[in-house]
Image (cartoon, rainbow, N blue to C red):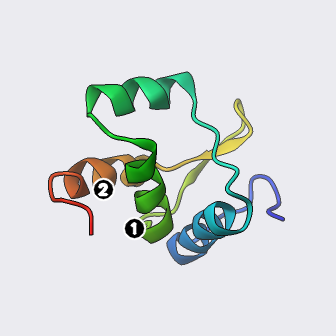
Amino acid sequence: MLRRNKRLEPDETTRVIRDIVRLTGNVVLSKHCRTRMKERNLTIDDLLAVLSNGVVKEPPEYSEEHEQYKLRSWTIQLIAERQQPLP
C-alpha cells in the first residue's frame, strides 16, 4: 500500500497502475474522465489498454486537497498515443 504524500518515481507509478488494473480491476472513472473519453471517442477497453501498457514519464504530483496523485504527463501521453491504433 502506498503512503500518502510519498514521492513516487515514474517506474514505480507505472508498476502501481499496472498492478491495480491487473490484480484488482478496480478502475473508477470520474465524471471528467467519462466526458473526455466521450469527446475523444475512447472506449473503456482503450483506457484499460493504456493503463495496462502505458509508461509514466514524469513523477506524479500529490494533491493535498484531493488526497490523490495527479499524472499530468499521462494525459498528454494518452492523447498523443491515441492517434495511432492500439495493438
* Quarter placement of the N terminus: bottom right
Q: CA distance from mark 1 to mark 2?
A: 9 Å
Instruction: Give how far across and how far down residue 63 sits, in percent.
Output: 65, 39
What mark, if any, has residue 77 been given in the picture? 2
Marks 1 and 2 close (CB-CB < 8 Å) = yes
Q: Is disc 1 placed on a helix, strand or loop?
A: loop
Q: Residue at x 48, y 25 (%)?
A: 32
Residue 43 vs 8, above or below: the answer is: above
Instruction: Give how far across and how far down residue 83 sits, in percent.
Output: 15, 52
Q: Residue at x 72, y 37 (%)?
A: 64
What mark, if any, has residue 19 been given in the picture? none
Please state which amino acid type lies under the numbered disc 2. Answer: Gln
Instruction: Give how far across and how far down residue 26 sits, in percent.
Output: 70, 50
Decide which of 52, 78 is in the foreground and name it: 52
Residue 14 vs 46, above or below: the answer is: below
Please state which amino acid type lies under the numbered disc 1. Answer: Lys
Crowd around label 2: few <14 · some 14–19 · many ≥20 (10 Å): some
Residue marked by disc 1: 57
Crowd around label 1: few <14 · some 14–19 · many ≥20 (10 Å): some
* Quarter placement of the C terminus: bottom left
Instruction: Give how far across and how far down residue 68 sits, in percent.
Output: 69, 43
Residue 82 vs 44, above or below: the answer is: below
Q: Quadrant of residue 17?
A: bottom right
**Left of 78 or right of it: where is 59?**
right
Q: Is disc 2 placed on a helix, strand or loop?
A: helix
